[in-house]
Amino acid sequence: MLMKTLLIDLDGVLNTYEGNYCEHEISPPREGAKEFLENIAKEYRIEIFTARDKNLAKKWLEKYNLTAFISNITNIKSPYTSIIIDDRALRFNGNFKDTFEDIRNFRPFWKKL
């Protein structure tokens, strides 16, 4: 049985990123990230999506013992991805007017209002 692919953003989802981007360092994992990955890896193929250097992301996964759950690190959103988990995403509901309002009001969960 072919597993569905989840594309999970690194910064702001798996780690404690809160707008404090550093090119050469990745924030530590968010509490519960390892358990989350371990559980969903039983049913889904997991790819990490990041704009960061792939080698830096790979080292981060290794440092926190997360590589066993990850199939790939990419900066491409594949058309074969079943679900994308991202802290800066909106779900399009088929209505452009609603989406325009959602864009105006959008804030990532970690951004203080």
Image (spheres, helix red, strand yellow):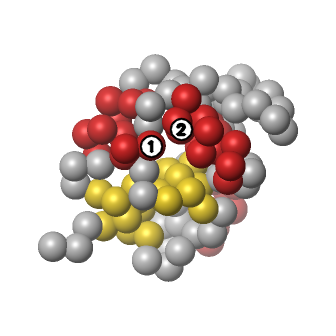
- Which of these two is toward me, 84 or 41? 41
Please name the amino acid that badge 2 sits on: Leu
The x and y percentages for residue 103 are 70, 54
**Which residue lies at the image location 70% right of the left edge and 43% below the top edge?**
56
- Looking at the image, tell me whether mark 2 or mark 1 is earlier in sequence order: 2
User: Do we see residue 22 in this rendering?
Assistant: yes
Residue in the picture at 30% in, 67% down: 4
Left or right relative to 18: residue 90: left
Image quadrant holding the C terminus, namely: top right
Q: Is residue 17 above or below residue 97?
A: above
Query: Which residue is denoted by mark 1 in the rendering?
Result: 67
Q: Position of residue 96 (x, y in %)?
A: 62, 71
Could you tell me residue 58's position as x and y percent? 59, 45
Q: Residue at x 42, y 50 (%)?
A: 70
Q: Are marks 2 and 1 in contact (CB under 8 Å)?
A: yes
Q: Nearer the viewer, residue 83 or 29?
A: 29
Q: Position of residue 2 (x, y in %)?
A: 23, 73
Does the image show residue 111? no
Residue 45 lies in quadrant: bottom left
Between the residue at mark 2 and the residue at mark 1, the CA separation in whole angstroms equals: 5 Å
Residue drawn where x is 68% and y is 49% of the image? 55
Query: In the orientation shown, which residue stands out farthest toward the right?
Result: 23
Which residue appears farthest toward the bottom when viewing the image?
A: 79
Please determine whether, in this image, residue 71 is positioned above or below residue 108.
Answer: below
> As displayed, is residue 107 above or below residue 7?
above
For label 2, the SS is helix
The crowd level at tag 2 (other Cα within 10 Å; few <14, some 14-19, many 20+) is some
Using a 10 Å C-alpha cutoff, classify the residue at mark 1 as few (fewer than 14 neighbours), some (14 to 19) or many (20 or more): some
Q: Which mark is residue 61?
A: 2
Three-letter code, disc 1: Thr
